[in-house]
Image: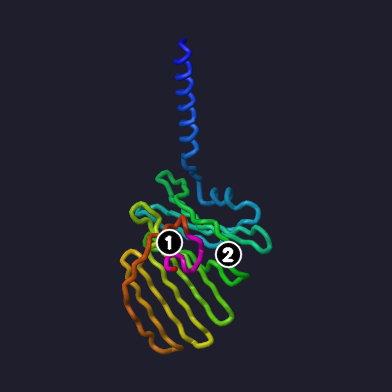
């Protein structure tokens, strides 16, 4: 065989081999159930913080979302949001996951709740000080083939003044509704438009101001 031909064939075979390995590496991993996913993910020091089931992509199947809490040390904890879509055969596949992010503060911030409603994921994170309390709910949805932040609602109260504010933001339309009230008084509402950027679930860092600050 001509030496040049041999070298060419060797290069082609090497390229094909690398292509097969890359293809295999990129193939998604399916889990028999959510429990099977958790069994693999909840290694030592990990726990399931909150989770929810519901249809996220309109196929009538029960998808799943959950926050994994990782205790890395006495002073370091992280959270990560996972989204699993149920396949037609009944198995589950990881469709998206957020950043694994350190929880701020010393017990002042935490994930309070997670729901799946009308094909959206609603995740609520709280933060408090001695005088204030803030609850931020981020709404993520599969929008134009992206797991995108589409809404944010932030409730804030200052107990020292008994003044509360609720700001509801639609990141797709730019509509913002802000309500303010004091004590038991009737709230006053203001409406405005804002230009929001494009924020994705994969970049979510559990910060209350994610997407709006």
90 or 117: nearer the viewer:
117
**Quadrant location of the C terminus?**
bottom left
In the image, residue 24 lies at what x, y percent?
A: 48, 35
In the image, residue 1 lies at what x, y percent?
A: 47, 10
* Residue at 64% over, 61% down: 76
In the image, residue 19 lies at what x, y percent?
A: 46, 31
Q: Which residue is mark 1?
A: 121
Q: Please report the bounds of the magenta region as a residue range.
A: 204-212
* Residue at 38% over, 87% down: 186
Label number found at residue 98: none
Tag 2 secondary structure = loop
How is this picture coloured?
rainbow
- Up the image or down, 4 lies above or below 201; here it is above
Q: Is residue 5 left or right of residue 194?
A: right
Q: Which residue is mark 2?
A: 103
Tag 1 secondary structure = strand
Chief secondary structure of the magenta portion: loop
For the residues labelled 2 and 1, the Cα–Cα distance comes to 20 Å
Given this view, does label 2 or label 1 mark the residue nearer the observer? 2
Magenta stretch: residue 134 in it?
no
194 or 75: nearer the viewer:
194
Q: Is residue 150 left or right of residue 202?
A: left
């Amino acid at each position: 065989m001509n030496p040049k031909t041999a070298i060419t064939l060797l290069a082609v075979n090497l390229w094909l081999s690398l292509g097969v390995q890359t293809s295999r590496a990129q193939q998604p991993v399916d889990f028999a159930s959510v429990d099977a996913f958790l069994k693999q993910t909840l290694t030592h020091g990990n726990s399931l913080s909150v989770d929810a089931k519901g249809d996220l992509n309109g196929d009538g199947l029960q998808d799943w979302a959950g926050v994994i809490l990782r205790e890395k040390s006495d002073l370091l904890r992280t959270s990560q949001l996972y989204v699993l879509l149920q396949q037609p055969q009944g198995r589950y596949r990881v469709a998206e996951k957020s950043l694994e992010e350190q929880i701020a503060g010393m017990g002042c911030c935490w994930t309070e709740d997670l729901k799946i409603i009308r094909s959206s994921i609603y995740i609520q994170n709280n933060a408090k000080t001695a005088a204030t309390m803030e609850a931020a709910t981020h709404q993520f949805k599969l929008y134009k083939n992206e797991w995108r932040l589409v809404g944010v609602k932030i409730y804030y109260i200052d107990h020292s003044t008994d003044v509360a504010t609720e700001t509801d933001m639609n990141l797709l339309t730019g509509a913002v509704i802000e309500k303010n009230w004091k004590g038991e008084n009737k709230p006053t509402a203001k409406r405005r438009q804002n230009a929001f950027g494009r924020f994705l679930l994969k970049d979510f860092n559990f910060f209350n101001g994610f997407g709006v600050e």
